[in-house]
Image (cartoon, rainbow, N blue to C red):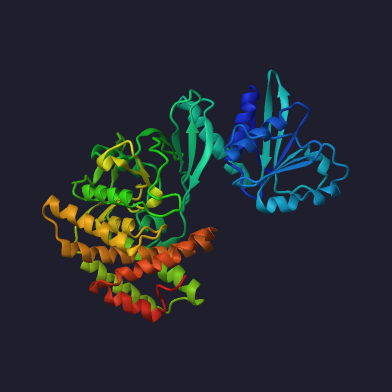
Amino acid sequence: MDGEISLFLKDEAATSRLGEDLALALKIGDCLALSGDLGAGKSSLARAFIRAVADDDGLDVPSPTFTLVQSYDLPIPVSHFDLYRLGDSSELDELGLDDALDIGICLVEWPEMAGGELPKERIDLRLDNEGSGRRATITAPPAQTARIRRVLKIRSFLDEHGYHDAGRRFLTGDASLRAYESIYPEDGSRRLILMDWPRQPEGPAVLDGKPYPKVAHLAEDAYPFVAISNVLRGSGLAAPAIYDVDYENGILLIEDLGTEGVLDTEGLPIRERYLASVACLAHLHSLAMPRDIEVTPAHIHHIPDFDRTAMKMEARLLLDWYLPWKRGVAATEAERQEYLAIWDGLIDELEGSEKNLLLRDVHSPNIIWRPEETGIRRVGIIDFQDAMIGPTSYDLAALVQDARVTINRDLFEELMADYLSLRREQGEFNETEFLKSWAIMSAQRNCKLAGLWVRLKQRDGKPGYLKHMSRTLIYLQVAFEHEALAPLREWCAGAGIAASES
């Protein structure tokens, strides 16, 4: 075992709180072995853990003392073992410990009764009485220890900022390394959102000695998020207020804009909400935005350009990931050179396009519907840390060709027409140049996404994103309808990339 964590738990509530925190740290395949004398708090911790995973404080969690195991069909399945009455360690096979670990998390009380049958890569947590409270001692392998230390660091952050004993629940993760928690203050006030965004070590160099995030100008810390949020809010748009930030550790406590999205209960786009989102973009694109934003007295955020290098790096994902996955062989050197030369030509075509702040991912997962508000403030925007200065058409392409939901042709045409009408009403607007820019940015984004879905599966172990592939390729064909995209359309046809592929 590597790494030891020692915590003093002053009372039963602190024991339960540790169980809740551990529910945010453990993953499928983890085995938490709970040891300690009778009455040490093992069952209390296990009960709090299970209720946190279930997000149900009233869930009945009986002790499995006589049944030996109680299983819970939760978002992550949990099996609660109590081995106090286990006759022989060989009986663990009959109880299905290995099968339970394949699909979920196992909590094991009285692990000493299992002999050597528990996984070696387990988390050991011992509870011992200490004065009026308890001492929790946790030992685990490095990966699990790191996860546990992270959730405890977030707990310390909440304590430091006045949110003692706040309830925590997992909210969501995304395709990046960010994760989000719901924070429920003990006084019952409105829920807050916590963004968990730990700094990452630099990855391998991909171009000119730089790792991918630096080449593509992706945000690597919280400063850009805070900067852009402040600018958007100052421009009358609905972005979350920032309450507290730990820039060094990547922990942000922000406003909860609500829970409603822009999709109906069947996952289909709601016309009114997409039209309002289009109006929000039209307003944003008409504004003059600063390039340098003071975040703290010691830090100025300079909004980077969505430049040629970044555009080509993203478009290369189709070459580097999609094509080898689809064909079983990598692109030839001739194919690569021709593809990249086509993109050089397309980027040259953007020279005269309108450029302003683009948020990068304006689509359904990142839009909150706020029915109590009016006008553009009905649209809450929550993901913009990678904002750049570039062709404004990129954000419109992201919205009207939502990567995660099918926008049918009729709605697509209506959204495009509405945006163009709003921009014409604002004054000077080169519609012809904008539509060419839109087609190029649509193609660039969808080439990126086609490769990204494969990379998420093969490199990051997230195969679920492949369900969006067919839609992405259909959207790419829509971009190809513009005459400026003829070279790329022909290259894709020659490479065997068609809208019917999945």
Rendering quarter of residue 300 = top left
Relative side of 340 to 112, left or right: left
Q: Residue furthest top?
A: 132
Vertical position of residue 240 compared to residue 344: above or below: above
Rendering quarter of residue 244 = top left
Q: Is residue 293 visible?
A: no
Relative side of 148 to 400, left or right: right
Q: Position of residue 176 (x, y in %)?
A: 46, 52
Q: Position of residue 456 (x, y in %)?
A: 49, 60
Q: Residue furthest right?
A: 87
Q: Residue at x 55, y 38 (%)?
A: 151
Total labels: the figure holds: 0
Vertical position of residue 497 compared to residue 262: above or below: below
Relative side of 48 to 317, left or right: right
Vertical position of residue 455 compared to residue 234: above or below: below
Q: Residue furthest left?
A: 427
Q: Residue at x 48, y 62 (%)?
A: 467
Q: Position of residue 213 (x, y in %)?
A: 40, 55
Q: Residue at x 31, y 59 (%)?
A: 411
Q: Quadrant of the N terminus?
A: top right
Q: Quick one: 406 or 386, which is closer to the camera?
A: 406
Q: Residue at x 60, y 34 (%)?
A: 20
Relative side of 170 to 226, left or right: right
Q: Position of residue 158 (x, y in %)?
A: 49, 30
Q: Is residue 174 visible?
A: yes
